Amino acid sequence: MKINMTSKEIFEELELLWGAFKENHDRFSEKQVKAAGVRARKSINEIRKLASKYRSTQLAESKEI
């Protein structure tokens, strides 16, 4: 993850992380793969961090308009 990302870059990263989360969540739920559960939790934690960063970045960008 880059330090200075635009809101668009953060959004794209969030989409990738959501895909990874969904895939691992489904694998854990359907096939009971423990490692997939760990990966799902890691992805959702990264999503949480990026969501906060998105909010502040988007707010700063909107003030520049």
Image (spheres, helix red, strand yellow):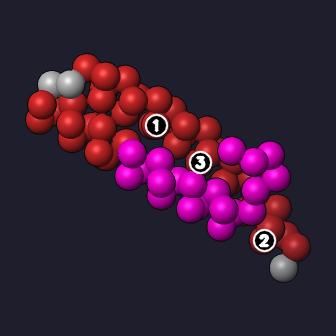
Residue at point 67%, 54% (across, down): 55
What are the residue bounds of the magenta stretch? 1-20
Mark sitting on residue 51: 3
Q: Quick check: 65 left or right of 57? A: right
* Residues tagged 2 and 1 counted as in contact (Cβ below 8 A): no
The image shows residue 27 at horizontal and vertical percentages of: 21, 36
For label 3, the SS is: helix
Asked if the residue under mark 1 is in contact with the one under mark 3, i.e. CB atoms within 8 Å, the reply is: no
Q: Is mark 1 on a helix, strand or loop?
A: helix
At label 1, counting other C-alpha atoms closer than 10 Å, the crowd grade (few under 14, some 14-19, many 20 or more) is: many
- Which picture quadrant has residue 38? top left
Q: Which amino acid does label 1 sit on?
A: Ser
In the rendered structure, the answer to whether residue 32 lies left or right of residue 58 reads left
Image x and y of residue 11, in percent: 58, 61
The residue at which mark 2 appears reads as: 62
Q: Which of 49 and 55 is in front in this view?
A: 49
How far apart are the two marked residues, 2 and 1, measured between alpha carbons?
A: 28 Å
Few, some or many residues within 10 Å of mark 3 (<14, 14–19, 20+): some
Secondary structure of the magenta portion, mostly? helix
Tell me which label, 3 or 1, sits earlier in the chain: 1
The quarter of the image holding the N terminus is: top right
